[in-house]
Image: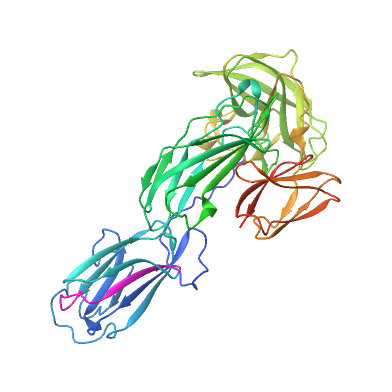
Amino acid sequence: MKTLKLIPFLSILSFSNVTFGQCPSGQTFVTIDVSTDAWGYECFWDLTLMGAGCGNNEFNSYGNVAQVGCGGAGQQDANGGGYPNNTLTTESLGCVDFGNCFDINYVDDWGDGGATFSVNFDGIQAYYFGGTGTGNVFSFCVTTNTEFDASISANHFQYTKIPISQSQNILQSGTISSDGYGDLTNVFMNVSVSKNGTQVYTVNSSTQNLASGLDAPFSTAGFVPTETGLYTVTYFADMTEDDGNLSNNYYSYTVDVTDSIFARDNGASYGIIGIGTGEPGYLANRFTILNPIQLSSISVFLGNTTGSISNNPFEVEVFVVNPGLVTSIATASGTVSSSAYQWHTVDLSPYPTLVPGEYLVALKETNYEQEVGLNEAVFTPNTSFVTWTSQPWANTESLGLDVNFMIRLNVNENAEISENSLTELSIFPNPTKNTITVNGLLPNETIQLFDNLGKEVFSIISSSSIQTIDLTEFANGIYLLKTENHMNSKIIKQ
């Protein structure tokens, strides 16, 4: 099988001597201000991982290294060197990854203390320590320069489109993290659901207190759509304190409740994948049927990058999944178009009835390689599967591929997927601080903008294929741009 090379991200400690303000996302520029008393030469300290102890795998040592060191507390024999007296000295650690925790192991030669330490994130004081006695260990964790900062993450509902006959809870649990250096109180997750731009449901989780650097799961009651329409689910993290960074408080996704379509993609392919020539097999999506339904057709997004398989047949197949057994129940075939990338829909006749259970809907490869589209709108583990001559059925993540195949199951009616073939608009810049330009519109096409609660905040009718929209006066956050003839788009206003 063709493979996608995945390069794992390794979280490592890194100290970069870059100018303040140039750290990449996920890092903070850390400095430590050391203020000495009239006997600056008595001061020694080193920086280690939290709990390591002075001198153990230290990242650096400072002050009077030669005469004091880790064992010099109370020795009273230092006579010069190290830091100057009555002076503030700034030590730069550079850009440091969020979440790393350190100890300042401070030793005073005379044993009475005297130096103070200010730990600063992006130039703003986050911790302050004053030395007393013979020696001290001061601990801190790297976050942001914001005191109170709640961020939220959640999983997308496993489908982008579901038939109304298979309606189910479309809400997911979430995780809230305390990313600032202050502790959060009465943290909760608000979930809002809008249908076609109008709010239809809102619910809050229970509250928790959340210490700096920690995270916790949050869940709410569910919501099951009872009508067709486009549902937007928005999660928001809130708390008692004023959040210093609202840009990470939101997470949102849409679920299209349709008459007939099961899908995990949003119609946009970011790549293609297939089983190599000479390796017959299947690439399949797994769907869960909750209520009996008739299967009418299957849609697959095929690649034909070289044009070599134009007008050749392709096959799709449906399998019912029972414990330890995968059984074929229906097949159908179509013809590959000459287009490099194209949706293909094939009918099943007679329509098989699907009873509640698990099904695999597959593209079959025989004597030449098929190329199926990949999509990243949703990835749910244990939903995309492959098999070939030497490989039993296996989910793609077990083979190192976190991918979603663009294969759809259509029920109830034999509808060609007109709404599935909607094109995307070109929107730039996105994110934006003031204006956006929307390119690819049709004349007299209505453009609507909805906020994260599903409220319409802007509407205009295009006069040409290009439309500029001024968002300068809009609040920062995530907006949904909807038109009559194109795919919906998310807009981020900063």
Evaluate whether residue 58 shows in this view: no
Q: Is residue 66 above or below residue 443?
A: below
Q: Nearer the viewer, residue 146 or 293?
A: 146
Point out the image quarter for the C terminus. bottom right
Q: Position of residue 150 (x, y in %)?
A: 45, 51
Q: Is residue 356 above or below residue 32?
A: above
**Image check: 206 left or right of 368?**
left
Image quadrant in which you'd find residue 379: top right
Image quadrant in which you'd find residue 205: top left
User: Which residue corresponds to the image point at 61% horizontal and 22% vertical from the top-left?
Assistant: 166
Q: Nearer the viewer, residue 457 or 285?
A: 457
Q: Position of residue 34 (x, y in %)?
A: 32, 76
**Image check: 355 left or right of 415?**
left
Q: Position of residue 20 (x, y in %)?
A: 49, 72
Residue 192 falls within the magenta-colored stretch: no
Residue 114 falls within the magenta-colored stretch: yes
Point out the image quarter for the N terminus. top right
How many numbered badges does the structure rendering display?
A: 0
The magenta region covers 108-122
Q: Nearer the viewer, residue 169 or 460?
A: 460
